[in-house]
Amino acid sequence: MLAKLYRRVRENRFRQWSSGVAELGRAPYSILLYRQYLQAVARQRDCVWLPFEAKPRPGVTSLYHRHDIDTAACLRNLPALLSIDCELGIPSSVFLRPDDEEGTAKWADAVAVKREYESRGIAVGLHTMSYAYDDPSARLNFEIAKFETTFGNTPRYITFHGTGNKYAAKRYAFQTELAEKIHQFGFVFGDFSSGLRSYHYEVTDCHLDAAGRFCKTDLIDPPPPMTDCSYIFLTHPCYWRV
Ligand SMILES: [Zn+2]
């Protein structure tokens, strides 16, 4: 009874909080904001940062932190963000995309960063856009092989690159298909399907309108804890001034 009441109070607080979320600023954002956000979250009670592959923890708010590396600029800025994560003891994760739109991000440039930060507890996986290709499974196998050749190991984790509405149907279809057979491709975990994990709230740096990318006030006023819910902090390091 008490637990139910406690949960309802938190849900009301969350609803009230989310109705007040508004635009905060335009990219690139100050790296100070990044650090202050993580520190503000650390001050909250009943919230716990978990590694990407860990199951949500009952009785608390489970927090996940993901960096999606879509461009060469993302890769260049990544160490600055990761060093803050490590300093604050946050088990963040990094996802590398093999077919970035600029054609300039080279996985070879990521080898040293991957080696250093994996040894410090950061998970590194594949960020795929294979669903946009004619044969997504064949394309995914190609990406896995490329990852293996570059880094010397099979990717254990996978996330999906977002493309708005452009390939929405193809994306959903392949996510559904892959969720059923994720282990057949050698992956341990991916968060691309609600059957695998769903997030109750996403704090991100990549909101988009006609004027470009922007962030919201949830970066200075983080979502309040809500028992048995999962939140994700999703960044693209190219949007930060390091
Ligand atoms: Zn992406």
Image (spheres, helix red, strand yellow):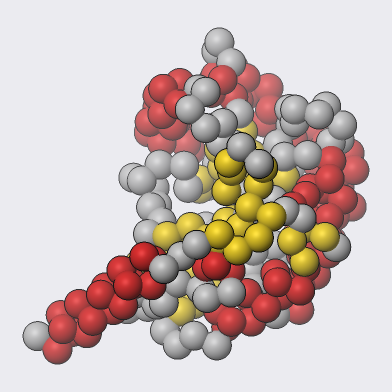
Residue 88 location (% of width, % of height): 70, 80
Q: Residue furthest front?
A: 211
Q: Is residue 175 left or right of residue 151?
A: left
Residue 103: quadrant of the picture: top right
The answer to whether 168 is drawn above or below residue 191 in the figure is: above
Residue 127 is left or right of residue 77, and the answer is left
Q: Determine whether 189 is above or below 119 in the image.
A: above
Residue in view at x 46 percent, y 65 percent: 21
Residue 227 appears in view? no
Q: Nearer the viewer, residue 64 or 146?
A: 64
Report the side of 228 relative to 81 (left or right): left
Q: Quadrant of the N terminus?
A: bottom left
Q: Position of residue 228 (x, y in %)?
A: 32, 71
Answer yes or no: is residue 162 visible. Answer: yes
| 90 vs 153, nearest the viewer | 90
- Residue drawn at x 62%, y 49% is 206
Quarter occupied by residue 102: top right
Tell me where residue 167 appears, x and y as whole percent: 50, 22
Q: Residue at x 48, y 57 (%)?
A: 202
Would you identify the image quadrant in which residue 186 lies?
A: top right
Instruction: Farthest residue to the top: give it.
Output: 134
Q: Which quarter of the figure is the C terminus placed in?
A: bottom right
Total count of labels:
0
Q: Which of the pair 188/217 is nearer the observer?
A: 217
Q: Is residue 78 left or right of residue 189?
A: right
